[in-house]
Image: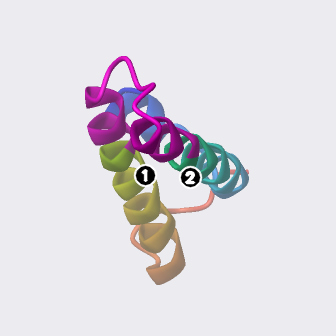
Amino acid sequence: MRSRDLNNLNIVEIDTKLEENEEALQNLKFQKAMQQLEDPLKIKFLKKEIAQLKTLKKEFAIGIREKKS
């Protein structure tokens, strides 16, 4: 997901996307352990997106970003 797409999300969408990504990351790690992972770079990109989502969530919490109606 691109950063401009992330900026348009509200807090509920961020939480949902964060849960989905954390679950997907766990599945990819299991695949890697079983040596069934086809594209190891997916883990890197998923970790980056999780970090971006957590940053956005923190910005909402401390008031840097306004909650959209």
C-beta proximity under 8 Å, tags 2 and 1: yes
Which residue reaches farthest top? 38
Q: Earlier in the sequence, mark 2 or mark 1?
A: 2
Residue 33: assigned label: none
* Residue 34 is a magenta residue: yes
Q: Indicate whether 21 appears above or below 39.
A: below
Judging depth in this view, the residue of 44 and 8 nearest the camera is 44
Q: Amino acid at mark 2?
A: Glu
Residue count near mark 2 (Cα–Cα under 10 Å), binned few <14, some 14–19, many ≥20: some
Closer to viewer: mark 2 or mark 1:
2
| Element carrying mark 1 | helix
Residue 20: where, in percent of width, then height?
Answer: 65, 44
Real-space CA distance between mark 2 and mark 1, rounded to the nearest whole angstrom? 7 Å
Residue 43 is situated, as x and y percent measured from the top left of the image, at 35, 39
Which residue is painted at 36% across and 27% down in the image? Answer: 2
Which of the two residues, 36 or 22, is positioned nearer the viewer here?
36
The quarter in which the N terminus is drawn is top left
- What residue sits right under mark 1 in the picture? 50
The residue where tag 2 is placed is 22
> For residue 21, which quarter of the picture?
top right
Q: In this picture, which residue range is highlighted in magenta?
A: 27-46
Image check: 26 left or right of 41?
right
